Image (tube, grey):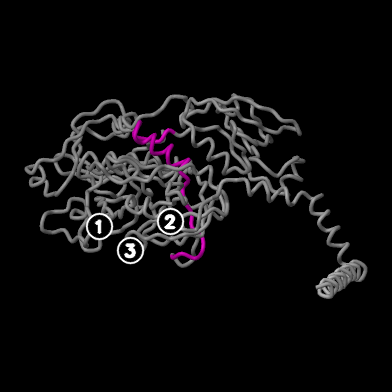
């Protein structure tokens, strides 16, 4: 036993001496050992571990299992199918036939069809889609994920944001909860849900690539482009569909793709819910969108502009011009100012400024922070409407500008005149039609080359014209007198 303990002691002593020798050799023979220590100290001085610990404390943006989000959203995304009437071919008809369409002599091509997507936002049948999905449609059909089909009514549109609101007569529908697009972060996972190429209930995934993108695709004078850019696959038919976060909340309406082929090539764009909610709320409450105006013309700040104007920042919206008697001028904003905040929201670009102002209504007072000659100023601006006032505009206000009441033609009138449709003016009062010289009892056949069969057709045409740019707010009317004489009129809604 004594020999055994003595042997074990010798072994342990040898092992200890060997370990100590190895550590000494490593310390003095490896020149990188001291550098490693220095590098660690350098990281600490740069604050890199602290930065990572800050991100570690943030809430998770979502797991990569998207099954729950897909299940929550797929049933509330609908297939929107539209039908467009084709006008009679003028190459195959004489002039009289072209305007009056005698029964039995019309040569109409088959109706065209198109499709897109929509998102159910209320259990009683309100559906959001893109304006370009239903633009100029004569009939709108909505097909639910369970294959139920409905005829939809167009509640209102806003070409400035490419948003439209539909309504179907149903209750107890599945809905997507409205999320906050402001909370989205670049790099966060999102899902695009829609009906590309008529493939219903399609879900694709990607990340938020950028926010507040302006890609100049909307053709409207007061357009607001502040898109969420993602790399989720979006194709024709996805327009109007849902962009949802990993909790299944709606954060955007898929609208466009960046492509030279017409198909997905890596980037897609969605209208954020911060804009969608405002547009939908206005349409439901007033029938039209209440567009608030600050009254400035902006330039993006580049390095060249910064040097040229001796600016102290590259962030913000540079005020190129102030509209006379507008909200900005009355608040004391001047040309050369750089707007950096609206209320509590930072303004990094002109697109940011458009989005923040676009969330407001005429009459709202906003706090505008700006830089002038290197100093920070804050002013209060009362936003106006397009006409320079602060009141809201109702759909009735816009429709009443025509100053007329209407009635549909009777079968006897159609037979006597040899026409299939038309809308007759019943009475005239002060308004756009009377000012343009349109007589009472005049029969309207077409406006802006669209057939007018009902008062709803006319209202829709007027509503779209009112939302167009100032130069395009004109109604070109073709019709006839009760005696059958063809007449043409141009009504300028912008005057």
Element type at marker 2?
A: strand
Which mark identifies residue 192?
Answer: 2
- Whether residue 488 appears in this view of the structure is no
Locate the N terminus and report the quarter of the image it occupies: bottom right
Label 3: which residue? 199
Query: Which one is earlier in the sequence, the residue at label 3 or at label 2?
Result: 2
Label 1: which residue? 86
**Front in this rendered view, residue 77 or 415:** 77
Residue count near mark 2 (Cα–Cα under 10 Å), binned few <14, some 14–19, many ≥20: many
Element type at marker 3?
A: loop
Q: Measure how far apart labels 3 and 2 are at the Cα level.
A: 13 Å
Q: Is residue 436 above or below residue 485?
A: above
Element type at marker 1?
A: loop
Q: Position of residue 191 (x, y in %)?
A: 45, 55
Q: Is residue 456 left or right of residue 315?
A: left
Q: Position of residue 274 (x, y in %)?
A: 48, 40
Q: Position of residue 147 (x, y in %)?
A: 23, 56
Q: Position of residue 397 (x, y in %)?
A: 34, 29
Image quadrant where residue 71 sits: bottom left
Q: Is residue 54 left or right of residue 494?
A: right
Marks 3 and 2 close (CB-CB < 8 Å): no
**Front in this rendered view, residue 100 or 157:** 157
Residue count near mark 3 (Cα–Cα under 10 Å), binned few <14, some 14–19, many ≥20: few
Residue 271, magenta (yes or no): yes
Q: Is residue 293 left or right of residue 485?
A: right
Locate the C terminus and report the quarter of the image it occupies: top left
Marks 1 and 2 close (CB-CB < 8 Å): no
Q: Measure how far apart labels 1 and 3 are at the Cα level.
A: 26 Å
Q: Which residues are magenta?
A: 263-290
Residue count near mark 1 (Cα–Cα under 10 Å), binned few <14, some 14–19, many ≥20: some
Q: Is residue 345 left or right of residue 247?
A: right
Task: Name the residue: 44% across, 50% down.
Answer: 244
């Amino acid at each position: 036993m004594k020999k055994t303990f003595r042997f074990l002691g010798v072994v342990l002593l040898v092992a200890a001496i060997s370990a100590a020798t190895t550590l000494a050799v490593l310390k003095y023979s490896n020149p990188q050992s001291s550098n490693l220590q220095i590098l660690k100290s350098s990281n600490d001085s740069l604050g890199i571990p602290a930065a990572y610990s800050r991100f570690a404390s943030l809430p998770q943006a979502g797991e990569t299992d998207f099954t729950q989000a897909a299940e929550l959203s797929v049933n509330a995304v609908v297939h929107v199918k539209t039908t467009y009437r084709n006008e009679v071919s003028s190459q195959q008809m004489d002039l009289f036939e072209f305007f009056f369409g005698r029964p039995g002599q019309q040569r109409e091509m088959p109706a065209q069809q198109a499709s897109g997507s929509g998102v159910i936002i209320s259990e009683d049948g309100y559906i959001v889609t893109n304006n370009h999905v239903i633009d100029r449609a004569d009939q709108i059909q909505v097909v639910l994920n369970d294959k139920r089909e409905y005829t939809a009514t167009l509640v209102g549109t806003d070409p400035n944001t490419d948003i439209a609101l539909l309504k179907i007569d149903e209750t107890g529908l599945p809905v997507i909860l409205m999320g906050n697009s402001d909370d989205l972060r670049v790099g966060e996972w999102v899902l695009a849900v829609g009906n590309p190429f008529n493939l219903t209930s399609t879900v694709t995934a990607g990340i938020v690539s950028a926010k507040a993108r302006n890609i100049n695709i909307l053709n409207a004078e007061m357009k607001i482009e502040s898109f969420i850019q993602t790399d989720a696959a979006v194709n024709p038919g996805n327009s109007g569909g849902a962009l949802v976060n990993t909790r299944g909340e709606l954060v955007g309406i898929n609208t466009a793709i960046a492509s030279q082929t017409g198909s997905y090539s890596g980037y897609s764009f969605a209208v954020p819910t911060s804009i969608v909610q405002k547009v939908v709320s206005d349409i439901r409450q007033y029938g039209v969108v209440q567009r608030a105006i600050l009254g400035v013309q902006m330039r993006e700040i580049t390095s060249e502009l910064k040097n040229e104007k001796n600016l102290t920042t590259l962030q913000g919206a540079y005020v190129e011009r102030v509209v006379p008697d507008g909200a900005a001028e009355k608040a004391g904003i001047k040309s050369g100012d750089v707007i950096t905040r609206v209320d509590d929201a930072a303004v990094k670009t002109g697109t940011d400024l458009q989005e923040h102002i676009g969330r407001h209504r005429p009459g709202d007072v906003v706090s505008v922070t700006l830089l002038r000659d290197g100093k920070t100023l804050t002013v209060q601006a009362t936003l106006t409407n397009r006409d320079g006032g602060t009141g809201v505009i109702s759909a009735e206000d816009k429709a009443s500008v025509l100053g007329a009441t209407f009635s549909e033609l009777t079968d006897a009138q159609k037979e006597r005149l040899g026409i299939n449709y038309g809308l007759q003016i019943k009475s005239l009062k002060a308004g756009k039609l009377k000012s343009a010289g349109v007589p009472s009892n005049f029969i309207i056949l077409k406006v802006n080359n669209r057939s007018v069969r009902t008062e709803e057709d006319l209202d829709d045409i007027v509503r779209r014209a009112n939302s167009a740019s100032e130069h395009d707010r004109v109604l070109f009317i073709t019709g006839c007198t009760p005696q059958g004489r063809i007449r043409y009129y141009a009504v300028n809604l912008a005057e």
